[in-house]
C-alpha cells in the first residue's frame, strides 16, 4: 500500500500540508522530532506518528521502511535535506520537500545518479515558489520560438513564518547568482529590473533563488535571472526566534502573491506573463499535498525532477485560484 510520510509535520507549513494530505485521503504517517506536538496532531487527524532525529541514520531508515514517499517540511533544509535524501535513496523512497534554499537543489544534482540507480525520485520544491515560477516560465517560454533567456520575479507580501525567516537568515549568500550559458555563475551585486505584476512596473532586486537551477533544468533555457519585490514586513529583523509561527488565515487571505516573467527569444522577441495566486503560505501546503498525491498515484521519474518538468507547466494553475495572464509582447530588446 502506498504511504506518505510528512517529516516536520508539526511545524507551521508541515501541519497545513498534513491537514491537506489527510483531507485528500492519502495514507499518511507523521514524522518529526517534537513528540508532544506531533502526537497531538496525529490524534487530531487519526494518523500514526514516528518520532526520530535526523542525526541517526538507522532511525531514519527504520522510520521509512514501509513508506513510498517522504515530504520534508522541516527547515532549515541545509540541515535536513541531506540526511533525508540519503535515507530515501537507501530505502527506495521518493523524496519531496518545500525548500526555497539553493543547497537542496545542488544536493539533488549531486545525488542524481545515485537516485537513478535506486529508482528514486528527488523532487525538491514540490510546493511553493519553485512550482509557481517554474510553471510560469515554462508557460511563457512556449509562446516564443527558440527561447534563450528567462528573467523572473516573485512579489512577496505579508509576513514570514518563524521557520522561513530563520532559514533565510542562515542562507544569505555573499554572491548573487544566475544561470549563464547553462552554468551557475556570479553576477554584479545590486542589479535591479522593472517587472509588471499587474499594476504597473515596479523595481525588483536581483537575488539568488533555486529557480536558476530548476527553470534551466525544466525548460533547457541557458540564461536565467531571478528577482524579488518585497512589500510589507516580508523580511523581518531582530530576534527571529520570537516571531509567531506564521501569518494567520486572515493575513494570508489579505496578501496574495504574484510573479512576473519575461522570456527573450533568439530573435529578440520578448514574451511576458504574470501569475496571480493565493498567499505563498497557503499555496505551498496545497501544492505539496497535490504533488505527493500524484507521486503516490505513480507520476514518478527517477533522479532529480522539478514540479513543472514532472507535472507540466499547468501544474500551478491546478492549485487554488491560481491563474496565469499573458501580457502584450514587449518591444524587441527591451
Image (cartoon, rainbow, N blue to C red):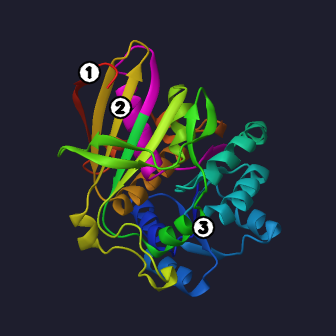
Classify residue 267 by image quadrant: top left
- State the residue lying farthest toward the left: 199
Horizontal side of residue 212 vs 24, given as left or right: right
Q: Is residue 14 magenta?
A: no
Please report the residue visible at 45 percent of the width from the left and 73 percent of the height from the top: 12
What residue would you read off at disc 1?
A: 331
Residue 242, disc: none
What residue would you read off at disc 3?
A: 170
Q: Is residue 36 above or below residue 45?
A: below
* Mark found first going from the N terminus, 1 or 3: 3
The magenta stretch spans which residues?
121-150
3D distance between C-alphas at marks 1 and 3:
40 Å
Residue 243 in picture, x, y percent from top left: 43, 81
* Mark found first going from the N terminus, 1 or 2: 2
Horizontal side of residue 43 vs 83, given as left or right: left
3D distance between C-alphas at marks 3 and 2:
30 Å
- Whether residues under marks 3 and 2 lie with C-beta atoms below 8 angstroms apart, the answer is no
Q: What SS does tag 1 mark? A: loop
Dot 1, crowdedness within 10 Å: few (<14), some or many (≥20)?
few
Please state which of residues 87 and 197 is positioned toward the viewer in this rendering: 197
Please state which of residues 60 and 158 is positioned toward the viewer in this rendering: 158
3D distance between C-alphas at marks 1 and 2:
11 Å
What residue would you read off at disc 2?
A: 262
Residue 174 in picture, x, y percent from top left: 61, 56
Amino acid at each position: 500500500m502506498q504511504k506518505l510520510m510528512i517529516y516536520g509535520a508539526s511545524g507551521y507549513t508541515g501541519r497545513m500540508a498534513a491537514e491537506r494530505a489527510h483531507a485528500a485521503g492519502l495514507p499518511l504517517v507523521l514524522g518529526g522530532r517534537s513528540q508532544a506536538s506531533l502526537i497531538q496532531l496525529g490524534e487530531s487527524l487519526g494518523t500514526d506518528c514516528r518520532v526520530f532525529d535526523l542525526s541517526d541514520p538507522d532511525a531514519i531508515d527504520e522510520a521509512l521502511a514501509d513508506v513510498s514517499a517522504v515530504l520534508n517540511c522541516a527547515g532549515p533544509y541545509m540541515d535536513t535535506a541531506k540526511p533525508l535524501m540519503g535515507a530515501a535513496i537507501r530505502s527506495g523512497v521518493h523524496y519531496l520537500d518545500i525548500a526555497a534554499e539553493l543547497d537542496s537543489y545542488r544536493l539533488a544534482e549531486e545525488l542524481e545518479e545515485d537516485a537513478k540507480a535506486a529508482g528514486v525520485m528527488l523532487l525538491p520544491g514540490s510546493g511553493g515558489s519553485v512550482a509557481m515560477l517554474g510553471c510560469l516560465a515554462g508557460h511563457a517560454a512556449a509562446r516564443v520560438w527558440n527561447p534563450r533567456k528567462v528573467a523572473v520575479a516573485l512579489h512577496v507580501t505579508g509576513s514570514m513564518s518563524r521557520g522561513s525567516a530563520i532559514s533565510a537568515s542562515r542562507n544569505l549568500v555573499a554572491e548573487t547568482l544566475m544561470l549563464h550559458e547553462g552554468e551557475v555563475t556570479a553576477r554584479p551585486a545590486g542589479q535591479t529590473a522593472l517587472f509588471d505584476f499587474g499594476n504597473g512596473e515596479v523595481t525588483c532586486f536581483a537575488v539568488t533563488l533555486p529557480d536558476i537551477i530548476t527553470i534551466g533544468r525544466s525548460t533547457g533555457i541557458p540564461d536565467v535571472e531571478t528577482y524579488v519585490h518585497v512589500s510589507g514586513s516580508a523580511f523581518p529583523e531582530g530576534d527571529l526566534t520570537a516571531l509567531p509561527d506564521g501569518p494567520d488565515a486572515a493575513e494570508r487571505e489579505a496578501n496574495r502573491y504574484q510573479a512576473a516573467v519575461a522570456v527573450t527569444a533568439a530573435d529578440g522577441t520578448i514574451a511576458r506573463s504574470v501569475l496571480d495566486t493565493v498567499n505563498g503560505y497557503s499555496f505551498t501546503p496545497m501544492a505539496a499535498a497535490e504533488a505527493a498525491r500524484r507521486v503516490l498515484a505513480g507520476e514518478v521519474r527517477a533522479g532529480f525532477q522539478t514540479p513543472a518538468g514532472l507535472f507540466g507547466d499547468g501544474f500551478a494553475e491546478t492549485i487554488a485560484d491560481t491563474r496565469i495572464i499573458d501580457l502584450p509582447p514587449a518591444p524587441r530588446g527591451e
